[in-house]
Image: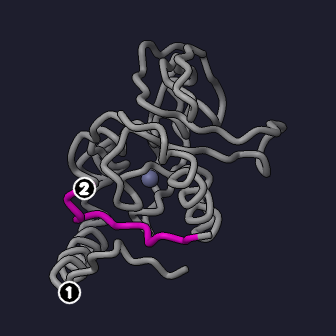
Amino acid sequence: MAVLDVVHYGDPILSRVCGPVVDFSNLHAIVNDMFDSMYEAEGIGLAANQVGFDMNLFIIDITHTEEIEETYIFVNSTIIDTNGSEELFQEGCLSLPGIALDVLRPEKVKLRYQTVDGQWCENEFDGLLARAIQHEMDHLNGLFIVDRVGEVERIKYQAELKALEKGSKDRIAAGSKKKGFVL
Ligand SMILES: [Zn+2]
């Protein structure tokens, strides 16, 4: 088991589009570490770049909040369509501690993705799962919940965002080459 540090707003890996997963041979180990890290941080979803991997990969576990018994791993995903009405729902983010914002998103999402074994799939998701998928897909495209709200909402958190940015800069300057394993 390896719990990886979740990187915060201001870290450059969270502000760019992640590259595709090409080599699937190592993926199970990475995904296991991601689950350990997500549970440790008490999140319901985690994108690979939030723990320092530049990969189109994210995981979701909402088994404790909805009547869904499986956990999800999505690789090389693309949103191919969204459906339903736009709904406001409060979202938090492991990379933006202390910030929660009402984000407007469509209620259904159709996703094309690969499984951890490389099988291509296409499925439509709704409810909390659809919301979590859109949140994680934003991460893989370099976007945060603060990019999904109006300027008035964003300004409320200006001090927190500045502090997070400074924290990330200091962390990088201190040179945590091992991406902060705490084991
Ligand atoms: Zn997030």
Q: Is residue 24 above or below residue 101?
A: above
Nearer the observer, 30 or 23: 23
- Answer with mark 2 or mark 1, whichever residue precedes in sequence: 2
- Tell me if residue 5 is in the magenta stretch: yes
User: Which SS type dominates the magenta stretch?
Assistant: loop
Tell me residue 125's x, y (percent).
62, 22
Image: 9 above or below 125: below
Quarter assignment of residue 157 = bottom left
- The amino acid type, in three-letter code, at marker 1 is Ala
The colour scheme of the drawn protein is one colour
- Residue 98, by quadrant, is bottom left
- Residue found at x 63% / y 65%: 42
- Residue 63: x percent and y percent? 77, 46
Q: Which mark is residue 129?
A: none
* Amino acid type shown at disc 2: Ile
Q: Residue at x 64, y 38 (%)?
A: 72
In the image, residue 145 sits, relative to residue 77, either above or below, namely below
Residue 13's disc is 2
Asked whether 12 falls inside the magenta stretch, the response is yes
* Crowd rating for badge 1 (residues with CA inside 10 Å; few <14, some 14–19, many 20+): few
The residue that label 1 is drawn on is 174
Q: Is residue 12 above or below residue 108?
A: below
Q: Secondary structure at mark 2?
A: helix
Q: Give the image location of residue 36, x and y in percent.
A: 62, 64
The one of 69 and 144 positioned closer to us in this rendering: 69
**The magenta stretch spans which residues?**
2-13
Left or right, 55 with reference to 134? left
